[in-house]
Structures are given as C-alpha cells and as structure tokens.
Image (cartoon, helix red, strand yellow):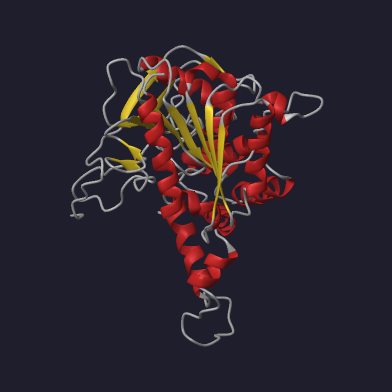
C-alpha cells in the first residue's frame, strides 16, 4: 500500500465517451464512430469555466494524476504537477486528461476491434494528425458541456496540440501553456522517428501491422524504438551523472552482453515499454509528430501568420539541456506570438534533465507554473 499523499487527487477511475458522429480525418479516411477514454480531477464549477485540458505526449495517456487503488504504487504520469495545492491546483480547477484517438490505453486505436470486421483494426487504422486530435478533444469538450477551457496545457507533442488548439479554436481557451515543444520537427527529429519506426516495421513479428491475429508482439522493434527515443529524451549531463562509464561487474567482460550501467538501464526501459505499448500506436504517434506544421499550407511558411488567429494568453517554457526540442524552438513560438502582439510569457528553465525535464519535479519550473495558474484562477471566467 502506498503512503498517504495529502496532495494527491487520490483514487481515480477512467471514463469512456462514445462518439457516433463520423469523423473525417486529415488523411481523408473516415471513422464512423470512436471512443475516447478520459479522467477528471477536481470539480467543474457551475458555469464550467474552470476546466483545464492536459494534452499528452508520445507515450502518455489519460492517467495523468492519482492512483487506481490503495495498492497502486505508481501514480499518473504528471502527478507531481496536478492535485490539491500543486501547481495545477484541483482545489480551483477541474483537470481533464484523455487518451488520444489512435492510442492504446482504451481510446479507439489500432488494437481496438473494427466493428466492420470483428477483428482488431491493425494496419487498417488510419493515420491521425494533431489537427485530428484537437477536433476530437473539442468534441469531448462539447459532450462535457465545456465551451471554453480556462487553460490547455501540454509538454512535447502535447505542447504542439496546445498550439493547434489556439489556432483552430481560438475562442475556446483563455490560456495556453506550451512546454518543451516546437512549432515543427527538425530534419534530425524526423530522422530519429524514422529509425524508431524502421525498428518496428522490420521486426519479423510485426506482420505488416496485423500481429494481433498471429498472437505475437513485435517486442524487439518496440524495444529498440524506445531505447533510441529514450537516449534523445535525456541530456548528456544527466546520463553522465547517473551512469557515466560504470560497469556492472566492475571489469570488462570482452563480450556483447550488457556491461555498462547505461546499457542495462536502456534495455530495462525498452523491455518495460514493449510490454505496455502498442507498436501500431507508436507508429501513429511518431507520424503525428512528423506531420505537425502549422505553416505547411503556406507559401512563405510564416509561423507569425499561422498563429495570427490565436487569442489566448500564453506561457511558453523551455529547458536549457533539452536538445530534442531546444529553447531556440520555443523562442520561435514566442517571436511569432509577439509579432501578433499577443500576451506571452517565456521562461527558460536551467535543468540537467534534457527533454524529460517537463515531467520532473523541478522547483523553479513548478513554482512558475503555480504562479501562472494562480493568475488564471484569479481571473475566473473573464
């Protein structure tokens, strides 16, 4: 049993929203119906003006805070940020986390049963984009009776969703918190994603995406994809301080087995991920990252023009050692917002944790979010 935490939202339970209105995705494919799994923390006020939407990153899901039982030792993935008295305070806000369309934690995705065939969608599940996610999130808000969010918050791929929200539905959010994100991926980032996908696509157990029918999981590919990704989420500093060149046995073994502590750590992370995440969902999520570019349809590729519709107030946060989404990329967002004379605050947090810093209990970062969200709470519905 985990120790009582007075700042935890406590025991939580997921809910399922069903949508029978068809959705046409940016790819042109249509889903006749779908489900989204979500969780809520805190109480929605009478005029439903205190809702905060949390958009998850690549491997995230709807379980953002709290525990599923008294025996549950692992809280939601952003439990250090959300709860009573925490930076996003559930005494003031009703926080909503959801598993995006195409996910593998309950929302309709490749591992879900296709009503037309009675089998898992597998390879036939369509590619989804950030635009598609934002549309489905807006439909969930409609179902919950939320016309405008007090704030929409996200880190990494989640931050990209926040940006898209501010463009597509500018009147439906008052504040946008874009953390450790970028307006689009660099060529290097697309390259990392492709290598990760190739690891999965070339796994003999992948079976063209229809591995469910074969009773196997492409674990080797998922494992390699996660190991590669994990290297990019950490900084060289944090890798050096945690692992350095430490040897597990204290001496060279002159073999290809695990010798260095960093190898052991990466393999552990890969093994754990390959047992809990769906390979097709990993492919979809990385493609959504690659495709995200608000300037894609413009001749001059102007981010300032793309962000012109945005009317929310912004908090943009970057971390010094994040080389996957470097601070320069956050400053591009800030400049584009300032070009449009938008209300924007920017912070660059000194951290050794690399891209993963947005998930960590970094005191300056948490205090900054706390102060900003207190201002949001004081504004109320204005």
| Badge count | 0
Q: Residue at x 41, y 48 (%)?
A: 366
Q: Where is residue 208 in the image (x, y as percent from the top left)?
A: 60, 40
* Above or below, 210 relative to 20: below
Q: Is 49 on the left or on the right of 26, as rendered?
A: left
Q: Where is residue 62 in the image (x, y as percent from the top left)?
A: 39, 36
Say which quarter of the image contains residue 301. Answer: top right
Q: Is 142 on the left or on the right of 294, as rendered?
A: left
| Residue sitting nearer the eye, 238 or 263 | 238
Q: Is 285 on the left or on the right of 372, as rendered?
A: right
Say which quarter of the image contains residue 84. Answer: top left
Q: Can you name the residue that lies furthest to the top here? A: 21
Is residue 75 in view?
Answer: yes
Q: Can you name the residue that lies furthest to the bottom here? A: 251
Q: Residue at x 56, y 24 (%)?
A: 166
Q: Is 294 on the left or on the right of 376, as rendered?
A: right
Q: Position of residue 29 (x, y in %)?
A: 60, 20
| Residue sitting nearer the eye, 15 or 279 | 15
Say which quarter of the image contains residue 257. Answer: bottom right
* Above or below, 73 relative to 379: below
Q: From the image, which quarter does the C terminus lie in?
A: top left
Is residue 128 in view?
Answer: no
Q: Where is residue 344 in the image (x, y as percent from the top left)?
A: 57, 33
Q: Residue at x 58, y 76 (%)?
A: 256
Q: Can you name the residue that lies furthest to the right here? A: 299
Q: From the image, which quarter does the N terminus lie in?
A: bottom left
């Amino acid at each position: 049993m985990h120790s009582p935490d007075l700042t935890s939202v406590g025991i939580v339970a997921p809910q399922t929203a069903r949508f029978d209105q068809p959705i046409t995705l940016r790819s042109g494919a249509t889903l006749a119906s779908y489900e989204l799994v979500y969780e809520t923390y805190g109480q929605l006020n009478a005029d439903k003006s205190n809702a905060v939407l949390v958009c998850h990153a690549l491997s995230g899901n709807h379980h953002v805070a709290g525990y599923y039982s008294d025996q549950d030792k692992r809280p939601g993935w952003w439990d250090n940020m959300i709860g009573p008295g925490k930076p996003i305070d559930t005494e003031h806000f009703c926080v909503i986390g959801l598993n995006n369309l195409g996910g593998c934690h309950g929302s309709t995705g490749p591992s879900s049963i296709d009503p037309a065939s009675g089998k898992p969608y597998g390879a036939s599940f369509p590619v989804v984009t950030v635009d598609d996610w934002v549309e489905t999130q807006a439909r969930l808000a409609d179902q919950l009776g939320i016309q405008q969010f007090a704030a929409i918050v996200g880190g990494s791929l989640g931050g990209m969703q926040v940006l898209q929200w501010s463009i597509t539905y500018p009147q439906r959010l008052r504040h946008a918190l874009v953390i450790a994100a970028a307006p689009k991926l660099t060529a290097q980032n697309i390259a990392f994603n492709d290598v990760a996908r190739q690891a999965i696509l070339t796994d003999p157990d992948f079976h063209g995406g229809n591995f469910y029918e074969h009773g196997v999981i492409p674990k080797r590919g998922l494992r390699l994809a996660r190991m590669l990704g994990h290297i990019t989420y950490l900084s060289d500093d944090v890798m050096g301080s945690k692992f350095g060149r430490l040897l597990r046995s204290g001496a060279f073994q002159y073999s290809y087995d695990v010798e260095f502590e960093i190898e052991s750590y990466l393999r552990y992370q890969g093994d754990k991920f390959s047992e809990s995440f769906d390979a097709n969902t990993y492919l979809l999520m990385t493609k959504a990252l690659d495709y995200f570019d608000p300037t894609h349809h413009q001749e001059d590729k102007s981010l300032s023009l793309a962000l012109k519709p945005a009317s929310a107030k912004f908090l943009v946060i970057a971390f010094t050692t994040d080389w996957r989404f470097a601070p320069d990329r956050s400053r591009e967002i800030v400049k584009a917002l300032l070009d449009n004379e938008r209300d924007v605050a920017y912070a660059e947090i000194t951290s050794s944790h690399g891209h993963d810093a947005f998930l960590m209990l970094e005191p300056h970062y948490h205090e900054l979010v706390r102060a900003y969200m207190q201002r949001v709470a004081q504004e109320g519905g204005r």
